[in-house]
Amino acid sequence: AKFGAEDAYRMYFTPNGVEQATRTSVAEHRAARFAALGVRSVADLCCGIGGDAVALARAGISVLAVDRDPLTAEVARANAAALGLGELIEVRCADVTEIDTSPYDAVFVDPARRGGRGRIFDPEAYSPPLSWATAAALKAPRAALKIAPGIPHEAIGPEAEAEWISDGGDVKEAVLWYGEGIAPGSFRATLLPSGATLTAPAPLPAPPVGPVGRYLYEPDGAVIRAHLVADIVERCGGRLVDETIAYVTSDVPYSSPYVAGYEITDRLPFNMKRLKALLREREVGVLTVKKRGSAVEPEELRRRMKLAGPNAATVFLTRVAGAPTMLIGRPLG
């Protein structure tokens, strides 16, 4: 799933290595950005099993791939050889904090974000810590740091451009970009596989909140993480249904790669019995359940509805002006 069948069947993996590796689509996007910036050599620090190094090499960039774990470094070396990229990828087993990166056009750092107890959420508990990675990035002409997409915006320094990347609608990671050709303080959401990119030069003001209109829009997760929902609100001439919920509503249809759109047919206070009666009346046999701001589990709701019939519907379990609400509709298009 991460590397594609053609590469995966030739590659070598460790359990931690494949868990933490960047999926090919994301690595290729990042490598293309480096190449577009004129980068021809990269020091890939904390290279893991080599997913990013492979993408960089295929973009024509020479790579120094560094990892302190001997087995992981050997796997990265074996993968470079197996994919015919050994001449472009030099693998070194070393502590990344001791590497001189000055001979390279750019630095890429992918700190370990998993420990013995699972995922690490504190950026200073990364290995190496985010503060060290940021200092290393600021010394380089250009740099990128791979971080968890849930990083608080206040943990991002003003020198960085912050980019959130989703693939097939799932948010995969965030990247902090530094150096020449980068817009410091800006925010970006990139959607793969299309490559559609939404940007803002600085944090956006809070969008307006208002009543539910005929249409509802569900922004892509990368747009939400990048705090660019206000941009969507402005583009569609709409408003939020609740100040704490990332659902956008408008009175006219709006089409965009950054949202999934729905036409709303019913708005009800949250009530299971009323929903069940409405679905039975509409002969709904296929129900898509979406939720934001609700504790109800979609599978439990579907089970209790005892669906039957030839029709389909989508129900949103959310809050509207603070009140638990059910919105029923169908996808646009």
Image (tube, rainbow, N blue to C red):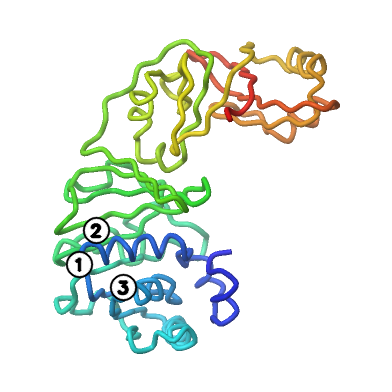
Distance of mark 2 from mark 3, alpha carbons?
A: 15 Å
Q: Are marks 2 and 3 in contact (CB under 8 Å)?
A: no
Q: Position of residue 147 (x, y in %)?
A: 36, 56
Marks 2 and 1, the one that precedes in the sequence: 1
Q: Which residue, given by chain and number where applicable, does mark 1 sit on?
A: 38
Q: Which residue, given by chain and number where applicable, does mark 2 sit on?
A: 131
Q: Position of residue 136 (x, y in %)?
A: 20, 66
Q: Residue furthest front?
A: 333
Q: Quadrant of the C terminus?
A: top right
Q: As shown in the figure, which amino acid type bears the numbered disc 3?
A: Leu
Q: Secondary structure at mark 1?
A: loop
Q: Nearer the viewer, mark 1 or mark 3?
A: 1
Q: Residues within 10 Å of mark 1 (few under 14, many from 20)?
A: some
When asked about the image quadrant of residue 126, the answer is bottom left
Marks 1 and 3, the one that precedes in the sequence: 1
Up/down of 268 relative to 83, above or below: above
Up/down of 302 relative to 199, above or below: above
Q: Secondary structure at mark 3?
A: strand
Residue at 52% of width from left, 33% of height from top? 260
